Image: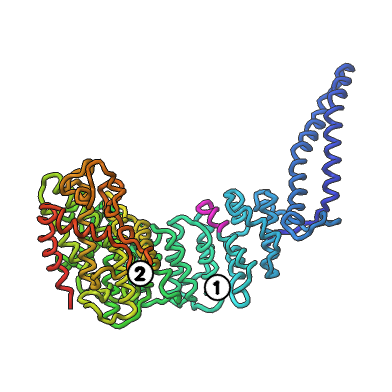
Amino acid sequence: MDGEYSGIDPAAMDDFERGLGRAEDTLGRNEPLIRRALERLDLDASGLSALRETRSWIGTGRPDLRRRSETIRKEQTGWGASSGGVPAGPVAFDEALYGEAARDPDVYAATTRLAEAARSGEIDGKTLAELEKRTGDATFATALMNALGATRFRKLMTDTVGPGRENDKQAKRLQTALGRTLGTAGSKLGKAWYDELTSDLDPGGKAGYTDWKRGYATVLALKHGTFGSTFLLTIAKRIDACDRQAPLHPNVMADLMGALGRDPAAAQDFFASDPSALKHYLTERPLGDGGEALGKALEAATLTFRDHDGSPDKPSRGYLSAKLASEFVHLEAERITKGGDSLVKPVSTGRILAGYIGDVNHVAWEGGDAIVPGVRGADYSYIPGRDAWGAQFDKEELRRVMKEAFADSAAFSPVMAAQTGFSGWLTDHGAAEIADGRGRDALLTNVEQIGSGFGMIADAAGLAGIDKGKELDEAQKLNMKLLAAAVDTGLAFPQKAAWPVVTGVITSWTGMLEEAVKGNAESMARSDANAAVDQTRILLHDLTIQAMLKHDLFGSADPPGKNHPWASLEGFKRGDDPLDNPNNFLNGDGRTLMAKDEMINKSVTGGAGDDQRFEAYRRWLREGSGEVWRSVRGPLDRAFSESFAQYES
């Protein structure tokens, strides 16, 4: 550390402080007595003011002496490995550091012990434990970072990486503690501190082993701490510039993307502020982690902010999200055409497409957008409310990107989940329009759009046109099971009042599909619906029926109207509880269908299952649902089939 060390004997300091205490007490008692005696003798007492000043100086100085003594003890025993008392004799004490540490005993102790760790290459366990206790203390963290300085901080982080440190648990704990402490100090350190932190990362320099370790040390701090978006963006741009001049270790850039993935605003600004950034990382710069960190950063940049604020000239974050999503698909399609490997994990591609499922349906239905990449600002017909800014896609580019991604079912499942949820939302709105007396146009138009979306998705997944008995490859088998799982679970997806839904909802729906596949993998091909078209039609029928039930288009549930499912139950009599009927296929509210796994009792031995409720549901659709369903089903099926047929081989 800088500054001259002076030798201080703690025991002597304590004796001196106690002696000063006695002197302070003596002066306090005797000065008034002397003053009164002099005044009685009519002698000059002005010289006694020196005694008062001396007593005041002692009173002011004693706390600092005690604090210095406490600082020495903290450094020697509180933060050190010594379990005994403070060693006898003089102890090194850095006056300059004491001032830099804001005269805080813990900060001084931490700084000196960390300096020792930097010299020896080893961190004392007690020092590490004390540091970990205080990583969230803003006052301590700021004082420690200022006392260390950015250069020494970076050196500490640098010394924790490299050969021999891969499995060093103490080193990894120190990385985490220092990163969290820096994150707690945050913007309180000021621009100069952060400029110093990256001062050796010279974009024009030649990267070598030491250089990548410096970059990695900085990124490790970002990995473990929580920082302001502006600071994170500044550091990310500087490291990116260095990497483009002379590539750093892939771990550096992967961890940088990981840090951006945890800060959506910084991630979006990183890609949106530099027109070359997205192309560089999608087509030129592999990060060695299978595309996971880049995918997370892109998800954060494109899915977190969805709005229709601002304008193309003054874009909101929602506008930038849609623009980046459009550019992402366009660049990925170009890369596929040229034959390059994907640098993004497929599941991230699937999640981004799922977040823009309305735009996927629009492109499938209307045949693609004229300007790509671009942002859609117009609202959709027959969809309630104002839409968020949308991503524009070229239809063939979108198909190529989906086809490549869907070779991994982890990418297909979020898209299938989002399509199911989106379809449920559109059919619900269409049924509401009928209930409000505005006719069937909304429902039929929405179903046609949904059918186009389902068809394009199924085609990209390799499912369109599959016949019974056709041998599927492994990816197709998984995707078919997910499609069938949507039939069995789609009715359970809670409907949102607006679109787009947040990423967390799509993740929840995806989990429902994947759980259904795991729990019921062998019976996914229910009844005779083995082809994707048949499975999708069943799902669309179920979603439409549920929407119509919700809006009482089959009449009231209490008492049941003549076309209501409860009126059609075999053996049902007025006054009976329909929930006790073995043929009942509705939930207790009388307005929602049971899930298919509830309609079919799979606990029956022999493997056939008890499909009594399911057969009652199908019988009601054929015979008891009435004119309302028949008036919708015919046009619905035609619109769906015409939309889906273009994707069948």
Q: Residue at the spot x=66%, y=67% of the render?
A: 118
Magenta range: 180-189
185 in the magenta segment: yes
Helix, strand or loop at mark 2: loop
**Residue 173: % across, % down:** 61, 64
**Residue 245: % across, % down:** 43, 76
Q: Is residue 85 above or below residue 332?
A: above
Residue 159 figure quarter: bottom right
- Mark 2 highlights which residue? 607
Label 1 with label 2: CB-CB less than 8 Å: no
- Mark 1 highlights which residue? 213
- Quick one: label 2, few (<14), some, or many (20+) residues within 10 Å? few
Amino acid type, callout 1: Lys
Q: In the rendered view, does 299 fall on the left or right side of 40?
A: left
Asked if residue 424 can be seen in this view, the reply is yes
Asked if residue 324 can be seen in this view, the reply is no
**Residue 476: % across, % down:** 30, 76
Q: Residue at the spot x=23%, y=50% of the render?
A: 571
Q: Is residue 131 above or below residue 169?
A: above
Helix, strand or loop at mark 1: helix
7 in the magenta segment: no
Q: Residue at the spot x=52%, y=59% of the render?
A: 225
Q: Nearer the viewer, residue 203 or 403?
A: 403
Label 1 vs label 2, nearer the camera: 2
**Residue 551: % across, % down:** 20, 47
